[in-house]
Amino acid sequence: MPNQQKFQDQEILTDMLGAQKQAAGSYNTFSAECTNQNLKNDMLNILRDEQSIQSGVFGEMHRRGWYQPQPAQQQQVDQTRTKFEGISQQLG
């Protein structure tokens, strides 16, 4: 195969993870906006499948050391918790 670029595993998995994130986001939006319950259930089932695939790709990348998210600092966790508790109280 002259003159053809061969993708490395890391590039392929990175592309797959990005595609799965995009697909999951789209199915999440679609399911939230469905007015037909049967269609909503189908979208939620597909969303669960997409999340499962995404989790598998993430797990493989993490196992190989290619995706190492940094743990959140406690201050960030506390700020986020406070923010969403406030929003929850406003909505409740």
Image (cartoon, helix red, strand yellow):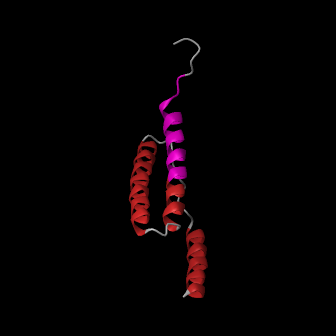
Q: Quadrant of the C terminus?
A: bottom right
x%, y% of residue 62? 45, 46
Q: Measuring 49% from the left and 70% from the top, which residue is drawn there?
A: 35
Query: Could you say which quadrant of the image residue 77 lies in?
Result: bottom right
Lateral position of residue 3 relative to residue 10, left or right: right
Question: Residue, x 60% and y 86% (percent of image)?
Answer: 90
> Considering only vertical position in the picture, is 6 above or below 34?
above
The residues colored magenta run 6-23
Q: Position of residue 38 (x, y in %)?
A: 39, 65
Q: Position of residue 9 (x, y in %)?
A: 47, 32
Name the side, left or right, on which 44 lies relative to 21.
Answer: left
Identify the image quadrant of residue 85.
bottom right
Instruction: Give left or right: position of 59 versus 69.
Output: left
The relative height of residue 27 versus residue 84 in the rendered view (above or below) is above
Q: Is residue 61 above or below residue 77?
A: above
Q: Residue at x 59, y 73 (%)?
A: 80
In front of the other: 74 or 90: 90
Q: So how many labels did they put on this image?
A: 0
Q: Residue furthest front?
A: 36
